[in-house]
C-alpha cells in the first residue's frame, strides 16, 4: 500500500529531509585525499544526532554504519572503514535521517581531488539522469515514466543503469511502496498522486549493469570492475511541479 502524506506529516518529512541533505553536503565537503571513509561516517553520525535526529541506516537490517560510502567500482552499500581516499577516486555517499517519525534519504557522488574527465562525465550524467526522471514525477503520470526517462538518458550517453537495486517510496518507513526502477517502458506501475514521497535514485555504471554483492552481504560492486555513480533525492509529488525535499535551505 502506498502511503499518501498529509500536511502535518509532510512538515515532519521536510525537516527530516533537510537534516539528511545537510549531512550529505557535510560528507561531500569531507571528500578529499587522506580522509578515511570512517571519518566521514563519524561526522555524518555526529551531525545527525546533534540535530535531534537518528541515522536511518545505522543498524537497519544489521548495517553497521550511519552512511553508505562507496568508492570507485562500489555501486552502493560501501561500509565505512579505515580506507584512505586517494586523489582521483570518486566517492558516493548515501545518507538518511529519521526525525519526528519520518525518514529522509539522499545520495551523491563526489570527486576526490582531481579526477579524470571520464569519471567526471559519469558523475554529471548520473546527476542529470535524476533530473530527467524528475520531469516525469508529476501527478497523473505512472511510476515507470520516471524509470523510462532515467534509462533513456543514461543509455543515450553510453552508460548502463543498475537493475538489481532500485528507488522506492520513503516516509514513516525507510523503504515503502512503490518500487521506483531506473529502467523500463513508460506507462506502467502505480499512478503518481499528490502526497506521495519517492526516493528517486539512479545508480549508473560506466560499463555493463550487472553487479556483485560481496561476502559482507552489503558491499555491491560492478561485475566488470568499472566505475559507478549514484545520485538520489527524496521527492514529493504535488499538484504541479515535484518538490525536492532533500534541500539544505533553512536548516
Image: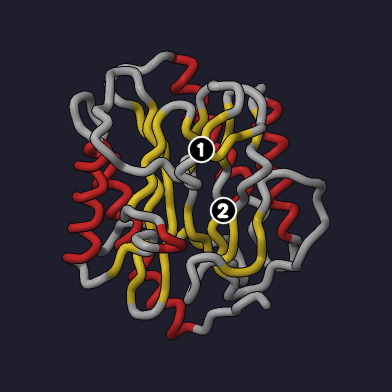
For marks 2 and 1, give the CA distance: 24 Å
Residue 4 in the image: state x and y as whole percent: 59, 79
Q: Which of the 4 image quadrants contains residue 247? A: bottom left
Which circle's residue, 2 or 1, is located before the other in the chain? 2
| Figure check: 74 above or below 191 | above
Colouring scheme applied when the structure was drawn: secondary structure
Residue hosting label 2? 200
Residue hosting label 1? 214
Element marked by disc 2:
strand
- Residue in front for this viewpoint, 128 or 90: 90
Label pair 2/1, CB-CB below 8 angstroms: no
| Figure check: 159 above or below 30 | above
| Figure check: 194 above or below 86 | below
**Is 93 displayed left or right of 76 in the figure?**
left
Rendered-image quadrant of the N terminus: bottom right
- Residue in front for this viewpoint, 73 or 30: 73
Amino acid at each position: 500500500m502506498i502511503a499518501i502524506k498529509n500536511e502535518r506529516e509532510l512538515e515532519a518529512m521536510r525537516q527530516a529531509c533537510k537534516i539528511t541533505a545537510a549531512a550529505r553536503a557535510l560528507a561531500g565537503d569531507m571528500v578529499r585525499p587522506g580522509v578515511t571513509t570512517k571519518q566521514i561516517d563519524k561526522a555524518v553520525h555526529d551531525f545527525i544526532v546533534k540535530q535531534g535526529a537518528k541515522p536511518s541506516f545505522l543498524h537497519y537490517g544489521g548495517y553497521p554504519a550511519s552512511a553508505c560510502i562507496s568508492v570507485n567500482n562500489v555501486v552502493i552499500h560501501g561500509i565505512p572503514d579505515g580506507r584512505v581516499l586517494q586523489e582521483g577516486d570518486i566517492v558516493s555517499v548515501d545518507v538518511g535521517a529519521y526525525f519526528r517519525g519520518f525518514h529522509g534519504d539522499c545520495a551523491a557522488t563526489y570527486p576526490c581531488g582531481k579526477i579524470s574527465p571520464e569519471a567526471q562525465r559519469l558523475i554529471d550524467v548520473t546527476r542529470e539522469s535524476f533530473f530527467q526522471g524528475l520531469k516525469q514525477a508529476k501527478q497523473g503520470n505512472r511510476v515507470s515514466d520516471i524509470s523510462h526517462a532515467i534509462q533513456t538518458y543514461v543509455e543515450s550517453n553510453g552508460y548502463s543503469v543498475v537493475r538489481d537495486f532500485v528507488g522506492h517510496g520513503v516516509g514513516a518507513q525507510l523503504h515503502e511502496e512503490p518500487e521506483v526502477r531506473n529502467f523500463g517502458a513508460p506507462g506502467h506501475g502505480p499512478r503518481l498522486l499528490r502526497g506521495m514521497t519517492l526516493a528517486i535514485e539512479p545508480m549508473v555504471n560506466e560499463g555493463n549493469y550487472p553487479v556483485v554483492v560481496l561476502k559482507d552481504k552489503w558491499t555491491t560492486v560492478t561485475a566488470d570492475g568499472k566505475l559507478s555513480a549514484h545520485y538520489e533525492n527524496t521527492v514529493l509529488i504535488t499538484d504541479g511541479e515535484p518538490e525536492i525535499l532533500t534541500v539544505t535551505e533553512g536548516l
